[in-house]
Image: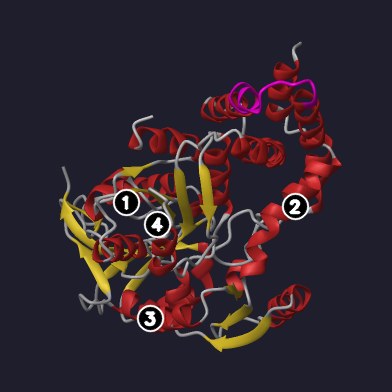
């Protein structure tokens, strides 16, 4: 098995230490960090997403795979920056104001990172103003989550606020969370809805035309 | 005098029984397992099946002792008998007596963990010990299972990630509905709060909304009446509910 394949397998199995060690080894062997990223990490996370959709993997497996991926990404990032390799796009993500639930949102953030996006995760209870701040710093995808029907309307509030701030045209808005539906996304004028973390990656890629 | 069938979440059992006993109407209470809202389509299917099993003329209205419950009640359809649903998001508002009181509490401190006698004493899900949480409390069994499957390092990580939610909470509230002996459950809530470093409060609940539901007092701003041929829908954008024609 090639070192790239070993990296891929260790990410899929959620082996953080092994993944980091193998990525370091690959770099030491002179393999291009961009190849490690695309053929090792991104490809592994695509497989993890597929396994989740097929019902082979559940949230814990996704979480540990994403953890292994993140550890490896930390090693690769400075090298990728040195090479001038651009991320797929910049996403700002958070759970809306008043809502403190973050497992689903964090999983989406990790899957997006695993797909090569730069992700700014603002955590939970995020106001429209905080989202806008990051959009002004160059994020072009806004991803919002809500678990409660009580807080779901904050998505509409945030979309209105980015309109007011003159940022709506340049921003792709995607939403998700247990009570959220495609119909709700249409109603409030979001650009996309994804029912799970794996679909969220495809939706972000689709919105950016990638 | 009317006859109502009250399809009731277990989490409201004692209060519904108490109010039913005092109602001027004849109330038949039917209980459904709490926690079904964790999978909204299961709760929706359970309730629709119960609605569909009621024969024409069997009662004057079917009362739903529920809220939106994470969209579980969205789509429920009235066949030949009207349905009545409180306009609340979940049982916490019903315990507190009004949506308005719940909204005030929520706005003041969203990081609140709610406890009630019914919810704790009827809890058969070891992973969930308070209202509004779904399988978030990791138990030793789950931990051991993770160690076996993913190794200790990953198991510790999963415990940490899945325990994150606790860090966002700052307050535990026990809602006293004034029925039954709740001292043991209240002690339990206090211990949980102490263990997690949350402030502990005890609040007096109110059977106001439950009484209104069972007594046939359904002002439009607090209750949604779904007439035959209609179903429950989300109203656009604002997270509230309305009726629409069933297809």
Q: Which chain does the residue under circle 3 lie in?
A: B
Q: Nearer the viewer, mark 4 or mark 3?
A: 4
| Residue at mark 2 to residue at mark 3: CA–CA distance | 36 Å
Dots 2, 3 in contact, CB < 8 A:
no
Which sits in the foreground, A97 or B218? A97
Could you tell me residue A84's position as x and y percent?
55, 35
Mark 1 — residue?
B51
Dots 1, 4 in contact, CB < 8 A:
no
Q: Earlier in the sequence, mark 1 or mark 2?
A: 1
- Mark 4 crowd level (few <14, some 14–19, many ≥20, 10 Å Cα): many
Dots 3, 1 in contact, CB < 8 A:
no
Specify whether residue A31 is painted magenta: yes
Specify whether residue B75 is painted magenta: no
Which sits in the foreground, A139 or B152? A139
Q: Nearer the viewer, mark 2 or mark 3?
A: 2
Image quadrant holding the N terminus of chain B, namely bottom left
Mark 3 — residue?
B98
In the displayed structure, would residue B11 be above or below residue A110? Answer: below
Mark 4 — residue?
A135
Mark 2 — residue?
B159
Q: Which chain does the residue under circle 2 lie in?
A: B
| Residue at mark 2 to residue at mark 4: CA–CA distance | 33 Å
Q: Earlier in the sequence, mark 3 or mark 1?
A: 1
Which sits in the foreground, B236 or B102? B236
For image coordinates 24% across by 76% down, the residue present is: B218
Give the magenta part as a residue range.
A28-39
Could you tell me residue A117's position as x and y percent?
51, 40
| Residue at mark 1 to residue at mark 4: CA–CA distance | 48 Å
């Amino acid at each position: 098995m090639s070192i790239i394949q070993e990296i891929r397998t260790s990410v899929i199995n959620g082996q953080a230490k092994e993944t980091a060690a193998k990525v370091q080894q690959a770099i030491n062997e002179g393999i291009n960090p961009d190849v490690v990223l695309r053929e090792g990490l991104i490809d592994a996370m695509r497989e993890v997403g597929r396994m989740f959709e097929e019902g082979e993997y559940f949230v814990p497996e996704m979480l540990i795979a994403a953890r292994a991926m993140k550890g490896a990404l930390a090693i690769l990032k400075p090298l990728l920056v040195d090479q001038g390799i651009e991320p797929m796009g910049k996403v700002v993500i958070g759970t809306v104001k008043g809502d403190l639930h973050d497992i689903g949102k964090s999983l989406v953030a990790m899957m997006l990172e695993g797909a090569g996006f730069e992700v700014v995760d603002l955590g939970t209870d995020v106001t429209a103003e905080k989202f806008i701040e990051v959009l002004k710093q160059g994020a072009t995808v806004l991803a919002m989550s809500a678990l409660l029907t009580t807080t779901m309307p904050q998505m509409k509030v945030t979309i209105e606020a980015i309109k007011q701030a003159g940022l709506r045209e340049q921003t792709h808005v995607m939403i998700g969370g247990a009570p959220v539906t495609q119909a709700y996304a249409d109603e409030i004028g979001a650009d996309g809805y994804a029912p799970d973390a794996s679909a969220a990656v495809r939706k972000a890629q689709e919105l950016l035309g990638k | 005098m009317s006859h109502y069938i009250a399809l009731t979440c277990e989490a409201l059992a004692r209060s519904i029984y108490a109010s039913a006993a005092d109602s001027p109407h004849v109330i038949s209470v039917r209980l459904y397992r709490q926690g079904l809202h964790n999978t909204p389509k299961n709760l929706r299917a359970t309730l629709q099946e119960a609605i569909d099993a009621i024969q024409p003329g069997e009662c004057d209205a079917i009362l739903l002792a529920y809220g939106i419950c994470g969209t579980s009640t969205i789509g429920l359809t009235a066949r030949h008998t009207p349905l009545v649903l409180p306009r609340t998001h979940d049982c916490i508002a019903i315990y507190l007596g009004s949506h308005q009181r719940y909204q005030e509490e929520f706005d003041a401190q969203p990081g609140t963990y709610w406890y009630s006698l019914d919810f704790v004493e009827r809890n058969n899900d070891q992973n969930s010990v308070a209202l509004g949480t779904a399988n978030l409390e990791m138990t030793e069994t789950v931990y051991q299972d993770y160690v076996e499957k993913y190794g200790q390092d990953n198991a510790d990580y999963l415990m940490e990630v899945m325990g994150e939610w606790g860090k966002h909470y700052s307050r535990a509230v026990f809602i006293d509905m004034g029925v039954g002996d709740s001292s043991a459950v209240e002690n339990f809530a206090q211990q949980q709060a102490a263990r997690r470093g949350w402030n502990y409060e005890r609040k007096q609940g109110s059977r106001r909304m439950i009484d209104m539901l069972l007594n046939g007092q359904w002002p439009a701003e607090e209750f949604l009446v779904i007439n035959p041929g209609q179903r429950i829908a989300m109203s656009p954008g604002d997270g509230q509910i309305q009726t629409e024609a069933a297809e």
